Amino acid sequence: MAGAEIENQTSVQKFILLGFPGSWYFRMSLAMMFSIMYFLTIVGNMSVIALVWTHPWLHTPMYFFLCNISFLDIWYTTACAPKAIGVMIGKSQTISFTGCILQLYFMFSLGSTECIILAVMAYDRYLAICHPLRYSSLMNSTFSTQLALISWLCGFLVISVLASLKSRLSFCGPNIINHFFCDIDSWIALSCTDTRLVELAIFIISMNILLGSCAITLISYVYIISTICRIPSAQSRQKAFSTCSAHLTVITIWYGSTIFLYVKPSAQNSLDLNRIVNIFSTIVTPLLNPFIYTLRNKEVKQALEKVISGM
């Protein structure tokens, strides 16, 4: 009897992703839109990395961290978009238990790493604006590399704990996920075992990663804005603020969507609304980031104009 009970609890090994309800034309239109956005995301973020790599005057800690963000965005959207496109065209609507675990692990790990690096970028801007004379000694290439490495390690190691907990869940009933990828909320809702420990782990990790990095970012910008306001020259104030405006725009978009999705005590609420917000965080934000940094950063614009003029 015990063996039969275990077999029943682990009988569901594949899940069906619903994607988006609607007509064939609607789903094909969405698939086309996702494909175009995914392509632009890859091209945009790779262009940022290539620009920084090929222009020596951009070899600074700020642009080093920006390359990390672009690299993260490429893989973050790759972990989701190709599968979502396959679901929408009806060619790849099933995903295995292991596939779900891996997709969730990489999306959470990459997302957590991005949160930490965004906080590191805020700290970098704090040192550059509040301590300009000591900046080159405080934020040298060795220290910036160490900060990036620590960010990646923390992001992936912390989520390993959560992945271990998720792998212990059992599924013995419905196997239809009301989403276009293996979203954690929709997936947990199908489990036939007690999910309170997993939900608590998600909440605690989200609180520490999201709100912790957000707090570092906010504190850094309180000091930054305070310092900028004390600069006597209007032109100097504008120049100082322009170095932060792109980063501020990115963190507002990123933290707004991710805090809404993951910092909550229960994981089984508003699945339809989560699906809409997830489009923004997994597809739209990685697409917007390179354009925000390009259009709102004078040095990147100059490098881009130099490349275009030389073509």
Image (tube, rainbow, N blue to C red):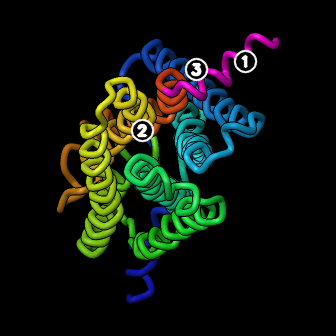
Q: Nearer the viewer, residue 102 or 135?
A: 135
The tag earlier along the polypeptide, 3 or 2, is 3
Marks 2 and 1, how far apart at CA: 23 Å
The image's mark for residue 247 is 2
Residue at left offset 39%, top offset 71%: 170
Residue 10, above or below 295 = below
**Residue bounds of the magenta highlight:** 297-311
Residue at left offset 19%, top offset 49%: 269
The image's mark for residue 36 is 3
| Left or right: 236 as drawn, with respect to 310 | left
The image's mark for residue 306 is 1
Look at the magenta stretch and give its main secondary structure: helix
| Left or right: 38 as drawn, with respect to 107 | right
Task: Point out the residue furthest to the right here.
Answer: 311
For residue 17, what is the image quadrant? top left
Q: Secondary structure at mark 3?
A: helix
Q: Nearer the viewer, residue 254 or 223?
A: 223
Q: Which of the two discs, 2 and 1, sits closer to the camera?
A: 1
